[in-house]
Image (cartoon, grey):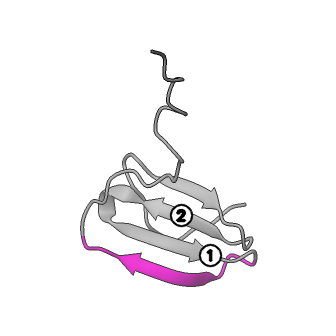
Amino acid sequence: MDYASGLSTQSMGAAKRLPNGNTLVTYSNVGVIHEIDANKQLVQEINLGGGIGFTVRRSTLYGPPPPYQW
């Protein structure tokens, strides 16, 4: 999918498909998150007014913990 919002981020941007079929587009360095639908229409914008870091959802950063051993 192509989506042109007019925004850009130098690093740490991401796009993630949501369970409802919409897409979450993160412009991390500028602090903006867009949710867009399948027709490329903006559903929601969150503007935090500054960098927000990397926003990819994971259950853990490094995978599951190793098994505990005595």
**10 up-or-down from 21: above or below:** above
Q: Nearer the viewer, residue 10 or 14?
A: 14
Give the position of the N terminus as an image quadrant: bottom right
Percent coordinates x, y for residue 33 in the rendering: 45, 70
Q: Is residue 20 left or right of residue 44?
A: right
Task: Tell me if mark 1 has few (under 14), some (14-19) or many (20+) residues whose alpha carbon lies within 10 angstroms of its own.
Answer: many
Which of the 4 quarters of the picture holds residue 36?
A: bottom right
Indicate left or right for 66 with 9 as reference. right
Residue lying at 47% horizontally and 61% vertically, measured from the top left: 26
Q: Which of these two is toward me, 7 or 29?
A: 29
Amino acid residing under circle 2:
Val
Q: Is residue 66 magenta?
A: no
Q: Evaluate if marks 2 and 1 touch, with contact meaning CB atoms under 8 Å apart.
A: yes
Q: Is residue 42 magenta?
A: yes
Q: Is residue 1 above or below residue 36?
A: above
Q: Quadrant of residue 50?
A: bottom left
The amino acid pointed to by label 1 is Ile
Q: Position of residue 63 (x, y in %)?
A: 54, 33
Residue at 65 percent of width and 82 percent of height: 41
The residue depicted at 68 percent of the width and 76 percent of the height is: 40
- Neighbours of disc 2 within 10 Å: few (<14), some (14-19), many (20+): many
Say which mark, if any, is on residue 25: 2
* Residue at mark 2 to residue at mark 1: CA–CA distance: 8 Å
- Residue corresponding to mark 1: 36
x and y percentages locating residue 4 in the rendered image: 58, 67
Which quadrant of the rendered structure holds the C terminus? top left
> Residue most toward the front?
70
Task: Looking at this view, name the residue that lies furthest to the top.
Answer: 70
- Residues shaded magenta: 39-49
Q: Residue at x 41, y 78 (%)?
A: 46
